Amino acid sequence: MLIDTISPVIFTIGPFTVRWYGVMVAVSFLIGTYFILKNGKERGYTEDQLLNSLIIAVICGLIGSRFIYVITNLPYYLDNPAQIIRIDQGGLSFHGALIGGIGSFALIHRKVGIALREGIDLSVPGFTFGIMLVRIANIFNQEILGRPTEFFPFPRHPAQIYGSLIGLILFILYLRLKNRKPYYPGELFWSFALNYSIMRGLIEETFREVPLIAWGYINTYYGVGFFTTVHVLTPLFIGFSWYMLKKTREQPLLEHDPNETANTTTKEI
């Protein structure tokens, strides 16, 4: 989707500029925080425990997300180093956010007293809304474009809309699994990771205008192309997520009465 008449800027006051991308990222963090606090308190964790781990995970997630994006677009940033910190203008890698955010939480979860598998489950709503809202922001930035196609009456695949719908579907799947109590600790996260890997690799990536690294097949009528870097890595993502989901389902089921407050000091970390 390429709309020349829209602007990435909402408004400007003197040197201060508010962009759609920055707003969408901020809103996704706020929504994620709401769900982490709400669901975490139901699990018996305190607000301090949740916020302390959240702050570290968010900071490391942003760093990891930007780092991976910059590395994959290194020639541009070597010529424009001042743009490296301009995350408000776009350029965040979802896989980098996962690595940075979840990786940092894995290192600190014992210190803050939150079980690792329960903690990563709490992160899922924030990730799904991040996918939904950031892809909408990509429309305003005129990035993440779809491949040209002759199949539709419009010239390109609306790849940003495909990505945003994937986020919505993932959130619905999360709610269905969460409400199917009891569930396995960690099951919510690894189900999310598995489904995202499948939908991102098979749907969004196929219709995005991304450089091909293998085979080099493009069908201009349907607007599809194979294989991108994500295409090549998708079997690894799917295999790893499936393996972790399988191992997760070998653990004891997680049962919980929201009206009862758990003693977090006795939780398995």
Image (cartoon, helix red, strand yellow):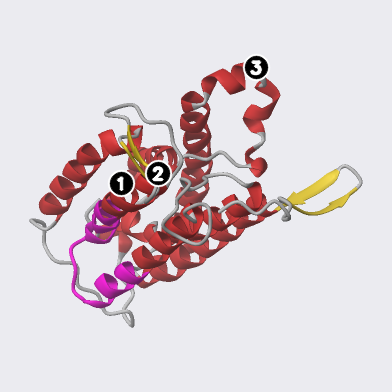
129 and 159: which one is in front?
Answer: 159
Q: Residues within 10 Å of mark 3 (few under 14, many from 20)?
A: few
Q: Nearer the viewer, residue 100 or 84?
A: 84
Q: Which mark is residue 201?
A: 1
For marks 3 and 1, the one nearer the N-term is 3
Q: Amino acid at mark 3?
A: Asp
Q: Look at discs 2 and 3 and give the one toward the viewer.
A: 2
User: What residue does disc 2 label?
Assistant: 220
Secondary structure under badge 1? helix
Q: Residues within 10 Å of mark 2 (few under 14, many from 20)?
A: few
**Residue 115 relative to residue 128: left or right:** left
Circles 3 and 1 in contact, beta carbons < 8 Å: no
Image location (x, y in percent) of residue 105 = 38, 44
From the image, tell me which residue sits under label 3. Answer: 79
Start-end of magenta stretch: 172-195
Residue type, mark 2 in image: Thr
Q: Which mark is residue 78?
A: none
The reply to whether the magenta stretch includes residue 185 is yes
